[in-house]
Image (cartoon, helix red, strand yellow):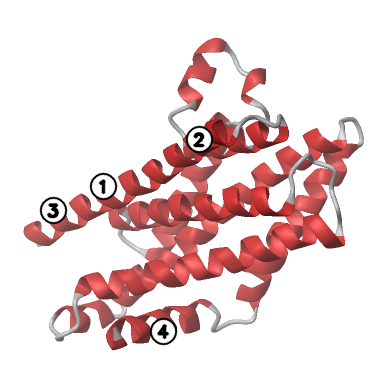
Amino acid sequence: MNRFSLFFRNFLACTFHRKLAYVLHFALPIVSFLAMFLLLRVGESAAFAGTQAIGLVIYFTMVQAVIVVSQILRDREQGIQRRINVSPASPAVYVAGNGAAALLVLSGQVLAFVGFVSFIFPVDSGLGFWPLLAILLIFNITAVGFGFLICAVADSSSGAIMAANVVVLFSSLMGGAFFPVEFMGYNLRRLAIAFPQYWVMKAIHQVQAGLPPAECGLSLLILLLFGLLFLVAQGVIRRRSTSLA
């Protein structure tokens, strides 16, 4: 437990060793939401503009998850991970400390964002404080799992961030984070369900429509399964990489 706490604090310190990180993780989602909302509000309803602006925040959440998790790759590049592997500390505890730090950073980001759009700049999007907070917190788990998967296949921290930008941009477009999937053709709509962004946006739409909690819960359960799938996949990839090394 002491080693986990040590790794956890170290990852947090590395994440915020530059003041710019506070802007990246806490101000950028809010500013991007405002810009997208005001742009869409010119010709659309507040509910539509608010929902699609949240999609942009979802995009940044996935990219920022990779940025935090990629500290593992930076440690490997600096030789720190090699020393950890030969120390009494378990590599699993090291990875768990990174994941917990990433979840805490993203949770703080979500809390700041939801508080802003609920109390400081209220948006009539049909979403209350608690439903939106719950949906985005659950999505954080998926985002962290995605971050671990990207870092498992990347050779460097910079490569992981570059790959994340490409993959997240494509999957956000296909998953309906930037515009509703109803605007797509039939085949593309069927393909959209393969991306986690589709399910988080679907959960948001279900809450807005006042559907029973069971239906919203199914979408959130699928989101959690995506996160589990990402974590299992990265574990398999890392194990194979270790055996080949």
Tell me which label, 3 or 2, sits earlier in the chain. Answer: 2
Residue 8 in sight here:
yes
Q: Looking at numbered disc 2 in the image, what kind of residue is underneath it? A: Ser
Q: Quadrant of residue 96?
A: bottom left
* Quadrant placement of the N terminus: bottom left
Task: Look at discs 3 and 2 and give the one toward the viewer.
Answer: 2
Which badge, 1 or 3, is on the more N-terminal residue?
1
- Disc 4 marks which residue? 10
Q: How crowded is mark 3: few (under 14 residues within 10 Å), some or many (20 or more)?
A: few
Label 2: element kind: helix
Circle 3 is placed at which residue position?
240
**Disc 4 from disc 1: Cα separation:** 26 Å
Q: What element carries label 1?
A: helix
- Amino acid type, callout 3: Arg
159 on left or right of 219: left
Q: Quadrant of residue 126?
A: top right
